[in-house]
Image: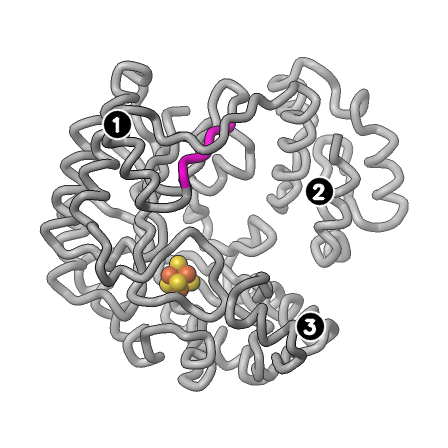
């Protein structure tokens, strides 16, 4: 397995009402300076990773597609200057439908992007507005069409359910419309209310009208049934793909394998060390300009913690954790570490154990966080 690289573009047109990702409104930001800082950060790893090719690159955000064509060219030149890629590397880029046009899509294709992840989130005009998204349903559909015309054959659509004011029928229509487009991959997330966001504040004030817990559970369950019937493989709690189109990059995270992250707030994990960069863009750039690695945190993971993280991250995958894989990676039998816990969760109906692998049952998927807590060290 080669290297997995993440590149963070922390700029958006404006903040959405639910978002607590490390992203900032782009107005007044020194985007060129930020890209140059990232290029410099990458160059410091060049010697360290010499001889290792990149198998997956994920340009996420924020809104990477907010970059102007010249800035995208600069970014990819910096990336290619510092890394060599496997011939069939997966190169993903996240795009907001409100920031795409045909020329940018063609350029992305030329730059080697072969997987486009469109942040559609919804196809109901009122709900998109309520979320604070900058695009309309029409722009989302047009972006998909333009991406196909530019030659993208691997497209993900991000969608959200459990939104304020969303009905079950409304969600069904959205998902049916999305599937009718024929994307290779669909990510379906339930809205999470984060503190300090506009939605978080409304929630605290009691003025956010969310579907109740049962409705949200039904939206999630129906999504799984419908997408599976439509030919998508439910391969991770929130992710569905046509056969062979599972996101390779994200599977690196769920298998707790090594990756390198660049940019403000980006994380890396190698040799059991997790490093996180300064989240604030100004601070990130200032530290890089002093010639220092922009690390806000560095934590060595104890072996027991690595095993625990690998277990609960692996359970996010519907294929679960294979005993043979676990033994090969850690040199110890899974049952020696977790035999009792697995048996208890199987008897509660939350895990399935076929002797080879351990995975979440359908009730376990709904109560995934409770199951994961059982594997904390
Ligand atoms: S576009 Fe994405 S990253 Fe940017 S504010 Fe909205 S949700 Fe957050």
**For residue 102, which quarter of the picture?**
bottom left
Q: Is residue 119 left or right of residue 243?
A: left
Separation of residues labelled 3 and 2 (CA atoms):
21 Å
Instruction: Of the two numbered discs 3 and 1 on the same chain, state the one appearing first in sequence.
Output: 3
Residue 137, image x, y percentages: 35, 79
User: Mark 1: which secondary structure?
Assistant: loop
Neighbourhood count class around disc 1 (C-alpha, 10 Å): few under 14, some 14–19, many 20 upward: few
Separation of residues labelled 3 and 1 (CA atoms):
52 Å
Instruction: Of the two numbered discs 3 and 2 on the same chain, state the one appearing first in sequence.
Output: 3
What residue is pinned by disc 1? 290
Residue 183, image x, y percentages: 38, 62
x 41%, y 44%: residue: 279
Q: Nearer the observer, disc 3 or disc 1?
A: 1
User: Mark 2: which secondary structure?
Assistant: strand
Q: Is residue 69 above or below residue 274?
A: below
What residue is pinned by disc 2? 359
Image-quarter location of ligand 1: bottom left
What residue is pinned by disc 3? 218
């Amino acid at each position: 397995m080669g290297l997995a690289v993440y590149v963070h573009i922390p700029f958006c047109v404006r903040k959405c009402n639910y978002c607590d990702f490390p992203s900032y409104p782009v107005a007044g930001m020194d985007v060129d300076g930020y890209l140059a800082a990232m290029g410099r950060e990458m160059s410091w790893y060049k010697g360290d990773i010499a001889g290792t090719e990149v198998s997956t690159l994920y340009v996420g955000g924020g809104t990477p597609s907010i970059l102007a064509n010249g800035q995208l060219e600069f970014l990819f030149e910096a990336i290619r200057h510092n890394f060599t890629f496997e011939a069939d590397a997966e190169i993903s880029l996240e795009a907001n439908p409100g920031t795409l046009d045909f020329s940018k899509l063609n350029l992305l294709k030329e730059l080697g992007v072969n997987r486009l992840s469109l942040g559609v989130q919804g196809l109901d005009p009122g709900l998109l507005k309520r979320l604070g998204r900058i695009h309309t349903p029409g722009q989302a559909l047009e972006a998909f069409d333009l991406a196909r015309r530019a030659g993208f054959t691997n497209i993900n659509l991000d969608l959200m359910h459990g939104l304020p004011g969303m009905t079950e029928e409304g969600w069904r229509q959205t998902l049916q419309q999305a599937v009718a487009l024929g994307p290779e991959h669909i990510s379906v997330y339930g809205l999470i209310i984060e503190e300090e966001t506009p939605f978080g504040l409304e929630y605290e004030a009691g003025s956010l009208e969310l579907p109740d817990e049962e409705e949200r559970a039904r939206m999630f369950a129906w999504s799984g049934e419908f997408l599976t019937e439509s030919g998508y493989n439910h391969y991770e709690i929130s992710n569905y793909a046509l056969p062979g189109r599972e996101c390779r990059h994200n599977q690196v995270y769920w298998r707790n394998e090594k990756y390198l992250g660049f940019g403000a707030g980006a994380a890396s994990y190698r040799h059991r060390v997790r490093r996180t960069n300064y989240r604030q863009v100004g601070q990130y750039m200032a530290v890089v300009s002093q010639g220092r690695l922009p690390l806000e945190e560095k934590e060595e993971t104890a072996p027991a913690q690595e095993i625990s993280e690998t277990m609960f991250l692996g359970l996010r995958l519907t294929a679960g954790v294979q005993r043979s894989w676990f033994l090969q990676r850690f040199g110890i039998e899974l049952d020696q570490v977790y035999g009792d816990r697995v048996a208890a969760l199987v008897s509660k109906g939350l895990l399935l154990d076929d002797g080879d692998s351990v995975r979440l049952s359908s009730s376990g998927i709904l109560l995934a966080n409770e199951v994961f807590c059982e594997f904390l060290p």
